Amino acid sequence: MDNVDLDVLRRLAQWRREGHKVVLGTVTRTWGSAPRPIGAMVAVRGDGSIAGSVSGGCIEDDLSDKARAGAWPTDVPSVVRYGVSADEATRFGLPCGGTLELVLEPVADHSGVEELLAELTRGHRVLRRLDLATGQAVLETASDRADTLSLTASELAATHGPRWRLLIIGAGQMSQYLAQMALALDYEVIVCDPREEYSQGWEVPGARLVTTMPDDTVTEMRPDRHTAIVALTHDPKLDDLALLEALKSQAFYVGAIGSRANQAKRRERLVEFDLTRDDVARLHGPVGLRIGARTPPEIAVAILAHMTAERYGFHKLEFEAPDAGA
């Protein structure tokens, strides 16, 4: 599920600490055009306060009204649908007659929400199984990076946590901006830098720092189609080591900082090893979209924009990678 819902869980946990009753809603099915994806979450406090979103606001308004009226589940989870009829679709603001199904669960100690929040804060991926008859939840380690959400007559099973990974080679200033922004975009961020003078000063909460050699780090990660690798040291001895392994992997995005002239030299170096021309052609270098970026945070935006385009299959963009800073 989209880890942006981490904020929903934080708010929910805070409300519970303050003594409020809270219901957690999870989108489990959609038909037609739905405003929010499966897995989206919303928390509703007993006084009608809302955290998160499952629609453009109309469904949240209805949930809020029901909370204030006490017309919501108090003991065990329930399944509700919005927009089944044309009139309801109009009333609840669902586009094109879309339909939204939610599981609404009253949160209690046995819901395991605080434990789930702790695991997600550590960057872990968790499979949560909710017993619909009792409201009891069990947490398990997610076995892979595929998203799971299934609803049966007896159980809601949902995967939570970051689905995508970003390995950054180098712990310099630009890496700090890139890591911070990537965390906000639901990436698990790993930063690799064996240089003590850089690794000692690394301070980005939520991003894991490793000091192993870049090629060993890439090999150990076993990059899959949910992995991006970006080399930012400007040191061929480090960047090229990572790229040699990354370009042979299934990583959906492999990029390296450097001017066009330096990138041409890098490509010639890479084909001297066990990489084919097709392997090397996968390299995005200079890395990022050409948006006029010059400062480290601007270049980080350009890199993440390009990663996002590749992630969603927008390969043919009118932009080109920046020449200078990246």
Image (cartoon, grey):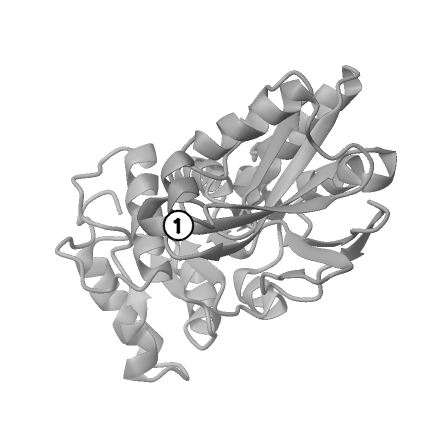
Name the residue tied to disc 1: 232
Which residue shows up at 43% across the image and 49% down it? 85
Out of 8 and 53, give the one closest to the viewer: 53
Which residue shows up at 23% across the image and 59% down it? 262
Q: Is residue 114 above or below residue 84?
A: above
**Number of numbered tags placed on the structure image:** 1
- Let me know if residue 10 appears in the view: yes
* Position in image of residue 14 (x %, y %): 71, 21
Name the residue type under label 1: Leu
* Position in image of residue 183 (x %, y %): 51, 41
Q: Quadrant of residue 143?
A: bottom right
The residue positioned farthest toward the left in the image shown: 318
Answer left or right for 87 relative to 132. Answer: left
Out of 296 and 43, give the one closest to the viewer: 43
* Position in image of residue 29 (x %, y %): 54, 56
Q: Is residue 68 above or below residue 199?
A: above
- SS under mark 1: loop
Label 1: few (<14), some (14–19) or many (≥20) C-alpha neighbours in 10 Å: many
Answer left or right for 38 relative to 153. Answer: left
Answer left or right for 308 relative to 214. Answer: left
- Let me know if residue 205 appears in the view: no
Out of 185 and 90, give the one closest to the viewer: 90
* Position in image of residue 233 (x %, y %): 41, 49
Which residue shows up at 36% across the image and 39% down it? 90
Out of 245 and 48, give the one closest to the viewer: 48
